[in-house]
Image: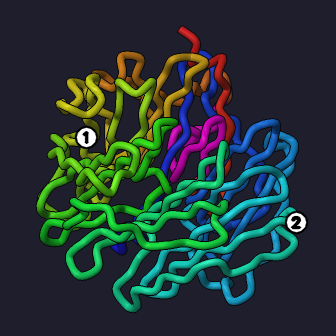
């Protein structure tokens, strides 16, 4: 969604005893909005002005990648990688400013794979590539009244529009390209995404991305009523429990309507009893500590009861922790978090153990 271009400063957090985020050196001033932890010390990040970063040593050193040809002014909102050499980066912008590029040589060179064909109205919002096979999905804002969805079966080399039903959009409804986490796909190939806009946020789901079954739509009990309000991010734990976060990004300190949860695989949704203490653009589950983490411009919150209640985390001055360590982050791919002005942090899981 275009209105998300103006926002995205999100956070990193700290408890009273340990810092959740250890700040890392990125050697860039770009606003970072894409992050993907591949594992085994490999992670990729992306952001404004064609910026792409890579680490092979768990974040100690971040390498600046070459900029794809013609991408010097593009805003790379999402990145998905397979290993230290292979990754696909997604830019978000009107029309053909939404693009996908691929590298297979550790980001020394890039190939343009796909440019948005829906000019001037198309806008890429979220990219997902399954590391276990060659399938992937790409989600875009509505064109001619319906959300756009493409799929790949060859690891992203080619993309085809799908014929999935139930993708009709409500008036002025869109998807926020805030952190490449507005869409999720689990091991069953269960596809879901969240929306925002004046008509009120929804979650749309489709089992196995089936063309024989239309998307199901559920209203979310979250902030609504404006183009800048709604659900920005969604994640799933063990099929049963999903959490959506968001709010009104022009009012980052407003805590009302910032999170909703379901404990029955999306059948019923409830507003969080104790919500995060401000607008949030990304949420993720840490299975090691059994803790949900969400970040936004004014802080970090955690939940240990699958989204019903959230607790704000703050830096501890007595431990000489950075005063703003709990804020100004945009996106999560645990253990990493990224934000504006080149900020990158890494989770200290010992701080979340209860």
Magenta segment? 321-338
Give residue 137's position: percent from left, percent from top. 50, 59
Give the residue pinned by disc 2: 105
Please provide percent x and percent y for residue 138: 48, 64
Q: Is residue 194 magenta?
A: no
Residue at 49%, 21% (x, y): give it.
Answer: 291
The one nearer the camera, 254 or 72, is 72
The residue singled out by tag 1 in the image is: 255
- Confirm whether the magenta stretch covers residue 333: yes
Residue situated in front as seen by the camera: 53 or 239: 239
- Rounded to the nearest angstrom, the CA distance separating label 1 from label 2 is 44 Å
**Viewport quadrant of the N terminus:** bottom left
Badge 2 density bin: few <14, some 14–19, many ≥20, Cα 10 Å: few
From the top left corner, tell me how far across and down residue 329 is, in percent. Answer: 53, 50
The residue at 35%/71% (across/down) is 148
Measuring 65% from the left and 78% from the top, which residue is drawn there? 113
């Amino acid at each position: 969604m275009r209105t998300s271009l103006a926002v995205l400063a999100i956070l990193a957090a700290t408890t009273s005893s340990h810092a959740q985020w250890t700040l890392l050196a990125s050697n860039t001033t770009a606003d970072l909005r894409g992050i993907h932890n591949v594992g085994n010390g490999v992670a990729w990040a992306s952001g404004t002005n064609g910026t792409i970063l890579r680490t092979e040593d768990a974040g100690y050193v971040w390498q600046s990648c070459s900029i794809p040809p013609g991408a010097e002014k593009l805003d790379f909102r999402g990145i998905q990688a397979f290993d230290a050499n292979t990754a696909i980066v997604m830019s978000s912008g009107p029309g053909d400013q939404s693009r996908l590029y691929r590298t297979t040589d550790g980001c020394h060179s890039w190939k343009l794979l796909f440019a948005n064909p829906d000019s001037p109205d198309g806008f890429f919002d979220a990219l997902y590539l399954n590391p276990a096979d060659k399938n992937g999905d790409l989600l875009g804002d509505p064109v001619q009244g319906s959300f756009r969805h493409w799929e790949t079966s060859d690891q992203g080399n080619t993309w085809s529009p799908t014929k999935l039903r139930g993708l009709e959009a409500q008036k002025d409804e869109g998807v926020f390209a805030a952190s490449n986490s507005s869409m999720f796909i689990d091991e069953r190939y269960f596809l879901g995404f969240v929306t925002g806009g004046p008509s009120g946020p929804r979650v749309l789901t489709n089992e196995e991305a089936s063309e024989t079954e239309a998307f199901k739509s559920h209203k979310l009990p979250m902030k609504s009523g404006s183009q800048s309000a709604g659900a920005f991010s969604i994640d799933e734990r063990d099929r049963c429990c999903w959490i959506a976060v968001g709010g009104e990004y022009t009012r980052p300190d407003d805590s009302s309507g910032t999170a909703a949860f379901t404990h029955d695989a999306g059948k019923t949704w409830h507003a969080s009893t104790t919500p995060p203490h401000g607008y949030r653009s990304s949420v993720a589950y840490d299975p090691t500590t059994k803790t949900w983490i969400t970040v936004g411009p004014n802080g970090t919150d955690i939940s240990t009861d699958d989204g019903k209640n959230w607790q704000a985390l703050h830096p501890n001055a007595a431990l000489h922790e950075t005063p703003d360590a709990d804020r100004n982050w945009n996106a999560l791919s645990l253990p990493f978090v990224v934000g504006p002005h080149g900020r990158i942090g890494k989770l200290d899981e010992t701080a979340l153990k209860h």
